[in-house]
Amino acid sequence: MNTTLGKRIATLRHEKELKQDELAEKLGVSPQAVSKWENDQTCPDISLLLLLAKILGVSVDELLSGKKAETPAVRILPENERKDIKDMMLRIVATRAKGDVARVNLPLSIIEVAIDSGLNMSQVSGNEALKNIDLNRIMDMVRQGTIGNIVEVESADGDTVQIFVE
């Protein structure tokens, strides 16, 4: 969506089949305020952005920029839409506070073998903070149809690790 904030709000509101007064009520503002936002006369108060984004089903970043989030949302797929585990990937992105980024892409079939051999997540990622991440649990979630950004860990020193299933 390469448009103004007001146009994005209007489009997302329509997609959710909400009327201006319904959105206004959920946010505790007047319908006129919503109208002014959508006509780019004013912008929502910053304190409303999180709730507004939640109601409209997007992240605050997507609401403000119009760009889809890079992080896949967590979803549980119906059985008929699930891929075979041999066609799926476990992606690990480790970002150091100093700016270094490491990416690991592993086929889930390899993770199954790793589980059988007793491998743990800290051995896969090299990050001791992840030693308590249970690979068996992740695989159980995948077998139940869970995909997306299933784990995100941030250490006290600002390092982050995200685990995605695609």
Image: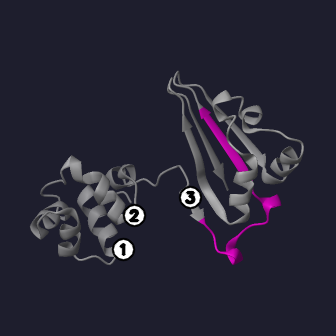
Q: Residue reaching furthest front?
A: 132
- Identified by mark 2, the residue type is Gly
113 falls in the magenta region: no
Q: Earlier in the sequence, mark 1 or mark 2?
A: 1
- Identified by mark 3, the residue type is Val
> Which residues are the magenta region?
76-94
Image position, residue 67 (x, y; %): 42, 53
Quadrant of image for the C terminus:
bottom right
Seen in the image, is 151 located left or right of residue 137? left
Question: Label 1, on which residue?
Answer: 15
Question: Neighbour class for label 1 at 10 Å: few (<14), some, many (≥20)?
Answer: few
**Decide: marks 1, 2 in contact (CB < 8 A)?**
yes
Quadrant of image for the N terminus:
bottom left
Image position, residue 8 (x, y; %): 31, 62
Seen in the image, is 38 located left or right of residue 78? left
| Residue at the (54%, 29%) spot, across then down | 155
